[in-house]
Each structure stands twice: as structure tokens, then as C-alpha cells.
Amino acid sequence: MKRISLEALLRTMQDQSYQEQYEYIRKLLEEEKIKPVKASRTNGKKPALYREYWILEEKKDYSEYIEEIKYNFSTRISVDYYLTHPDVYETDRPWVLLLNEYLKEHKDALKTAESLNERSFEIWSREKFLDREQGKKILNRCGLGLEFLNIYRTTEPLAYYTHTRNTPQNLLILENKDPFFSMRSHLLSGHTEIFNMEVGTLIYGAGKGILRSFQDFDLCAEPYMTDSGNKIFYFGDLDYEGIGIYENLVERFQDRWEIKPFIPAYEAMLNKADRLENLPETKEHQNRNITSIFFSYFSNTTVEKMQAVLQNERYVPQEILNRADF
């Protein structure tokens, strides 16, 4: 609100009598165009007027929008929010109308799952509207959740090497790129086993990236990889970070998959580490919040060796192993 003096309000009424000036101010008050600033006190005349006033914004007529909200919306859209916030509807209206048209004319398209960006473009002709723009707010104000749109989120494609599609088979997830390529070369050279275990598929985990990729495992993987008879193993660095990735993977997907550490590879790492005078120091800022899930798969002797490495602020990288060890 803008503050204005009585003199400024009456500037065009200078030639009128005080009674006419008073009637003019009274009319502005009745029409709710101004409101007195009571702290400014009156002018001492009769009838009295306040010395200052607030200029009130003119109330906007939203009746046309109210009618549109009440009678033109799809029954799937909740009208409650916009009926009580017609000013917000005025801003959101172009996007709400596009959603409304989609739900009226193309509702059957929701029967088929689409990616977040695909559905966003389908409805609003903007692929990032749901992810980075105001799409989620529009949905929320319409009483709808993302799940209503039957969408899925995409992740980086799962990188893997298929040595055989026979099932059941062993799938091996590798934290880092070098072991993935080395083991791939080992299998391509005619071998079928790594540390005396047959391996049908190698999966490159890309560190913590595997946590995102595995969320869409059914979408990213070939059908043979999701066979219920398959076994999944994990092999990463012997440090807090590598163990943490494994334990996060287990906790997130334990309802569907039993993911075990690739024990012979970890034991081979420790055996080579025993022959070294110095192991690299633990990298800074690693999350040390690990549990006993990882260690529960190993013998007591192996666990003692692993914990000794960690407690001495050292770690063993996967790269300690190479093709000659497999």
C-alpha cells in the first residue's frame, strides 16, 4: 500500500468547499480505495478528516476464472486450491489448461509408462518442465502426485560385458573401471572363470553410481540378467568407501537380490597386500559409517586382517590385482 497525505488527495479539490472535500474523501473510503492512517491524527476541523491515508489496491475480479475452475476442469484435477487462490491460478493458468486438455483428450496415454522427460514434453511441450521448472508445483496444486503420471526416472545406462547369456549364472559387479576392463580381457581371452568361479557377466559399478543404476535394473538389464536363479557378487576397494557402497547396495535391494562379496578376490587382495611394506593411506573425507554386513561373509582370520588395514588408516585398491592374478 502507498501512503498519501490529505492535501495530496484533495489537490484537485482546491476550489471546492470543505464540505464537498469531506464528501469526496468519504466516497473514497466507502469504495475502499483508501484507508485512514489513524496514527496521523485528524485535521481538527468539523467534520474531521485524518491527515494521511493508505491507497488500497483495487480488488481484481476473478469471477471468470472461478467459473472456469468450477466447470471446465477434468474430474481428476482437484479444484480446491485454485478456488481459494484465483490469483495464483491466473499465473498458472496456461500450464493448468495444458494438463487439463491432456487429461480430457489423452488420458489413455497414462496407461503406458514413460520417462519423466517424455511425459513432461507430451503434456507441456517442455521436456524439463517436471524436473527443473514449475511442473511439480502445478501437479501439487491440482492434487496430483508424480506417480499419477505413470513415469519412471532414467539413470546412466548400466555398463556391462556379457560373456554368456546362459542362466542361471554369476554376475559380478566391479566398483572401478580398471578391474572391469582387466577381467573383461581375461574372459575374452578364452577363460570362463575368475578365481575359480564361473562368471557370465561383468557389471561396471562406477563407484556409487551402481546405487542409482540398480534402481532401474529391470529397465537397463537384458532379460537373462534378471533370472531368479542368478547369483550376484560385488568386488570393490578394501576401504570404508568401497565397503559402504556394498552395504548400501545390499540394504536397498535386499528384498529382491542377495548380493554377496566376491570373497576370493578380497582374499587375493589381502595376500598381495601382505607382501608390501607400505599400503596407501586412507583417502580423506571417507564416510566411516559401516556395519558388520560386509564382514559377516568372511572368516574370522580374514576379518582381522581387513580391520587391521582400516584401523591403521590404510586401504587396498582393487588395482592391486591384475590379469595374471585372475
Image (spheres, rainbow, N blue to C red):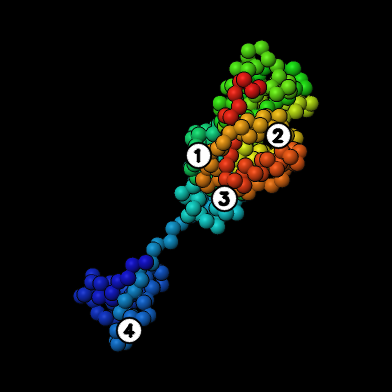
Residue designated by label 3: 141
* Above/below status of 38 relative to 311: below
Question: Where in the figure is residue 224, as x and y percent of width and height?
Answer: 72, 21
Q: Amino acid at mark 4?
A: Thr
Residue designated by label 4: 42
Can you tell which of label 2 and label 1 is closer to the viewer? 2
Residue designated by label 2: 261
- Mark 3 and mark 1: span between their CA atoms? 15 Å
- Residue 129's disc is 1
Q: Amino acid at mark 3?
A: Arg
Q: Amino acid at mark 1?
A: Phe
Q: Secondary structure at mark 2?
A: strand
Image quarter of residue 208: top right
- Mark 1 and mark 4: span between their CA atoms? 55 Å
- Mark 4 and mark 3: span between their CA atoms? 46 Å
Can you tell which of label 3 and label 1 is closer to the viewer? 1
Using a 10 Å C-alpha cutoff, classify the residue at mark 1 as few (fewer than 14 neighbours), some (14 to 19) or many (20 or more).
Answer: some
